Each structure stands twice: as structure tokens, then as C-alpha cells.
Amino acid sequence: MIVRRIGKVLLVILIFAIALIPAVFLNTLYGDFPAFFLALCLGLSAVCLRIARKRITVESELDGTDSICERGRKISAGLRVYNRSKIVTAKTVVNIFISDLFGGEDSMSRMYLALAPGKETGFGLNIAMPHIGVYRGGIRDMEMWDFFGFFQVKVPLNGAFEVFVRPRIRPVEELRESEVVLAESSRDTRTMVSGGMDYVGVREYSMGDPMKQIHWKLSAHSQGYMTKLQESSREVDYSVVLDFAACREDDREVLMDLQDTLIETALSLLDEIAKHHTNYTLLYCDRHRNVRRIRPRGREDDLDLIKDFSVITPEPDAAFPDACRILLEEGSVASRSTNVIVVTARVTDELLQELMRIRRQRRVPELYYVIPAGLNSREVETLRAKLSQLDEAGVRHYFVYTTDAGGEAA
């Protein structure tokens, strides 16, 4: 860009030098006329450019039905540029943008056009929306040149539209790449009856638990006291933990794919659970790093959830509420769930230990491990080996590959 500007300056100097040649040989007004005329033309061209710049406006036309779309679909938008001046514009470039998950603006295309005086120019856009979130798109700015191409100005415009890209709800079978089938898991999740009291399992003794709730027989074979988990009904309850912590990753596109798959996996699981049970909650970190515990009502809550979800955070600091910290908080409340499902893209040793601890409490944990689709077989086997201790502890785990914008599982 700098080289091009220097070239233009040198070209103008050369043209003026040529225009001054007659003045050297003709010591009259006629000799100065070419240079004077050239300067006048350049000045008028610059003035016209400034006038036209102030009279350019833009409007966006987005059908209300297109303001919400599912991930992977395209939205159709129309943009109209008005030249309200009486001056025709020369070379004009419109910079089209779409925002990304992290708040930046990625220029998608450059459109070249010319605007007649007092006229409008309209054009349509078909933009693919490959990622979940609320995005802004439209005209970021406009670059205009004068008639001779020597002067350039930028016109900041506000022709933007907003699109909510919602997650796709997928069948649970599509999410699972591999699983450890546990014959005893069905026994752990059903309500059992002992001594006329309903309970769903046991957990480690906590200070303040009534003595009559202690499972004496099991405690005799354990290293400490075990307390019965009482339940007033036979309804099975679930907690789905959505973790936005990730391993180090410099590629933003990979991070956005991970975020998409994390959200779609968690909401797809909740959708499946809601078909059979009424007692379920979603736990996640919001954008203010608070742990939220809610019960989504269905697709009608998608927009509020997406706006509230934290952005995926590679290698977060210790204060970030990752899956392990959320599980610790969930396990300390009286209403903790018997079935705990963790959806994460980062599995730490601490998380594995917490899942196995939950299993020892006779609760039923599951792990959905979201991994990039581009991993080779050796990398996948390394991840499998890391999860081998879950096999020994009887904790179900699944691999979920990220998917492309077209929606096909990798």
C-alpha cells in the first residue's frame, strides 16, 4: 500500500513536470496554462470526491425469516447504496464483512461499483453461516477514488444486519463415536427400595448427614461412612455439564468448530433426556465467569443461552469454572443429580479423578469428549489411552468429532 502511494505521488510530480515544459519556453500566460489547467482539474476532482463522500448512505434489507438460521445454512441479505449527491462517483469499492465468535470482523469480499448521481444501487448477498452465535454482517466501509484515481477516501457506513445462528439438534446416536457398554449402569440409575425408603444410591458421608441415613452394611466394606441418597419419587434426574475450557489452540477456526460441537452435543443430549424425563438441568459458565444452573424449556431458549454462554477459552486460568470445578460445586449441593453428563473439549487428570469419585458414590457419570476432526489415528489412540482408567472405573465415555458446516459427522 505504501509503495503504491509513493508511486502515485511520483506520477503526479512527473505529469506536473511535463506540464511545466511549455512555461520554460513560453514566457507568457499560455505557457503556464497546461500546469494551471492540470492543477484545476485535480482540485475539482478532489472537491467532488469530498462532496460525494458526505452524501453516500446505505440501507440493509434482511427478511425477518432470514434473521434466524440453523448452523450451516445460508442467509439472503440485500444492501442498497444511495448516492444523494449530483456527482457521479468513479471507482468505488464496498467492503463486505461478517463478524466472528471472538468479536472481530473478517472481510468476506470486495464489490466494485459506480454510483450515478441521485441514484441507488442494490445487490444481494448469500452468506453461509458455519458457526453458532449472534453475528453482525453487512457493509463495513466504502473506498472511493476521484476521477483521476489520485485521491482516495474511506466512507464509514452503518449498513449492518444481525443474524442468530442456532445450533442443530442431532440424534444422540450420531454424537457417539465409541462407547464402553456397562451392564450394571441400568441398575445404578433405577430407583431402589430398602427398608421402605426410596433411594437412588449412596455417596460419601458429609458433616451433618443424619445417622439413620448411613448405609452401615456398605460402610463396613468401605474406607469411610456412606450415606444413602434419598429421593421422594422414582424420577431419574440428570445434570449436563457444558465445559468451555479447551486445550491450547492457535487456529481460531478449530476453536469455533469445537465451540459449535460442544453446544450442539449438550443441547442434543438435553433434548433427548427431555423426551423421557422431566428432571434435568444444564450447568455452564456464562460470559461473566459465573456458574449457571438452569432448566432449558426447549428451542425457544436457544437465543438467550447462546448469548449467555461463555466463549471457548484455551488454557484458561485457575479462576475459570471448567468442568472439574463445576462438578465439585454440583456435588456439594443437596439437589445434586444421580446422572451426570460432562461435555468438554479438555480432559484433565483432575477431571478424570472427579468422574471416578462420582462413580464411587454410586452415581452415574458419563463423558462426551469433543475432539477436532483432523486428528490422525495415532493422536486418537493417545486420547483413548488417557481415558483407559475410566474403563477400569466403569465410567462411560464417548468421542464426538467436530463437524463441518454442512452438518456431516467427520
Image (tube, grey):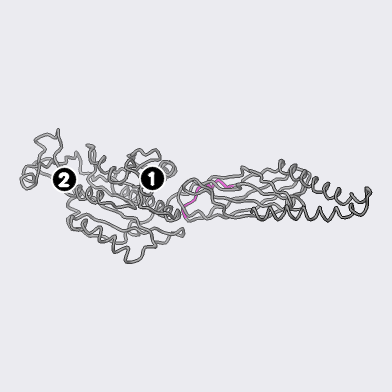
The image quarter containing residue 126 is bottom right
Is residue 342 left or right of 24 when viewed as pictured?
left
Disc on the earlier residue, 1 or 2: 2
Which quadrant holds the C terminus? bottom left
- Tell which tag, 1 or 2, sits nearer the viewer: 2
x, y percent for residue 206: 15, 37
The Cα–Cα distance between marks 1 and 2, rounded to whole angstroms, is: 29 Å
Residue ID for mark 1: 298
Q: In the rendered view, does 27 fall on the left or right side of 280?
A: right
Which residue is at the front of the view, 149 or 194?
149
Amino acid type, label 1: Gly
Q: Amino acid at mark 2?
A: Gly
| Residue 72 picture location, percent across and down | 48, 56
187 lies left or right of 383: left
Q: Quadrant of the N terminus?
A: bottom right
Residue 307 drawn at (x, y percent):
44, 42
Q: Residues within 10 Å of mark 1 (few under 14, many from 20)?
A: few
Q: Dot 1 lies on which element? A: loop
Is 67 part of what is drawn in magenta?
Answer: yes
**Badge 2 is on which residue?**
201
Residue stretch in magenta: 62-71
